[in-house]
Amino acid sequence: DTGVSQDPRHKITKRGQNVTFRCDPISEHNRLYWYRQTLGQGPEFLTYFQNEAQLEKSRLLSDRFSAERPKGSFSTLEIQRTEQGDSAMYLCASSRAGEAHEQYFGPGTRLTVT
Amino acid sequence: AQKITQTQPGMFVQEKEAVTLDCTYDTSDPSYGLFWYKQPSSGEMIFLIYQGSYDQQNATEGRYSLNFQKARKSANLVISASQLGDSAMYFCAMRAPNTGGFKTIFGAGTRLFVKA
């Protein structure tokens, strides 16, 4: 399977704990995006990488959130001191360069904070 | 500010009939791209169709077509010959690089139910 993969698919954690999610994009895609989706809503943009450079961050991304893409391949999204409001689906997507190129999404990581 | 509006929370269509899902957008950027994605109950987002703001013709991809009315700022998705497998959430999305950077903004979605 050469699509976008995400790990884990589900994560249950207690409030206050740290969690880290991983995304492996399609290998030839140099653009990588993180989104958050809550029930009944469309995805909300969190951050964007071109190769290893984080070029844009949403104001939704508080200082408890950090994302990396150290070698321009896989990416990690860490949430520190999780809160119940962080419960959501976290989606990763990748694309080729160029505005017309669609994003390919992974299956998402569903986070539940108890 | 950029915005995508999908005013139909839910739509029903009879199998084999056509259905139109509405999408209006707002941007001051003269260059933008419009996308439609499908999200089945399994959760993955599936790209359906793309329309560029400078494209002269409406985009088509198989049974999907995009009715692009630039002056009205609308980008409705038309699904012809609906199938049971088309039952899903559908999201309209926009990217406007000059004013919106790299982010893609999504509407709230329309849930489509196809009846046998």
Image: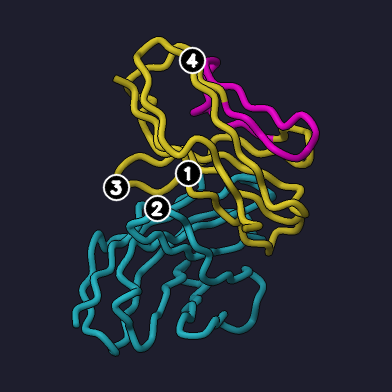
Chain colours: A yellow, B cyan
Image coords of residue B91 (percent x, y):
41, 59
Image coords of residue B56 (percent x, y):
64, 81
In front of the other: A1 or A108? A1
Q: Secondary structure at mark 2?
A: loop
In three-dimensional space, the C-alpha distance between marks 3 and 2, rounded to whole angstroms, equals 12 Å
Q: Secondary structure at mark 1?
A: loop
Q: Which residue is mark 3?
A: A40
Residue at horizontal 33%, vertical 83%?
B82
Pick the quarter of the image with the C terminus of chain A.
Answer: top left
| Residue kind at label 4, given as amino acid type | Asn
Q: Secondary structure at mark 3?
A: loop
Residue B94's quadrant in the figure? bottom right
In three-dimensional space, the C-alpha distance between marks 3 and 1, rounded to whole angstroms, equals 15 Å
In front of the other: B91 or A67? A67
- In the rendered image, residues at marks 4 and 3 fall on the same chain: yes
Image coords of residue B86 (percent x, y):
35, 74
Label 2, residues with CA under 10 Å away: few <14, some 14-19, many ≥20: some
In front of the other: A63 or A69? A69
Q: Which residue is mark 4?
A: A18
Viewer-nearest of discs 3 and 1: 1
In three-dimensional space, the C-alpha distance between marks 4 and 3, rounded to whole angstroms, equals 26 Å
Pick the quarter of the image with the N terminus of chain A.
Answer: bottom right
Label 3, residues with CA under 10 Å away: few <14, some 14-19, many ≥20: few
| Residue kind at label 1, given as amino acid type | Gly
Q: Quick check: marks 1 and 2 in contact, CB under 8 Å? A: yes
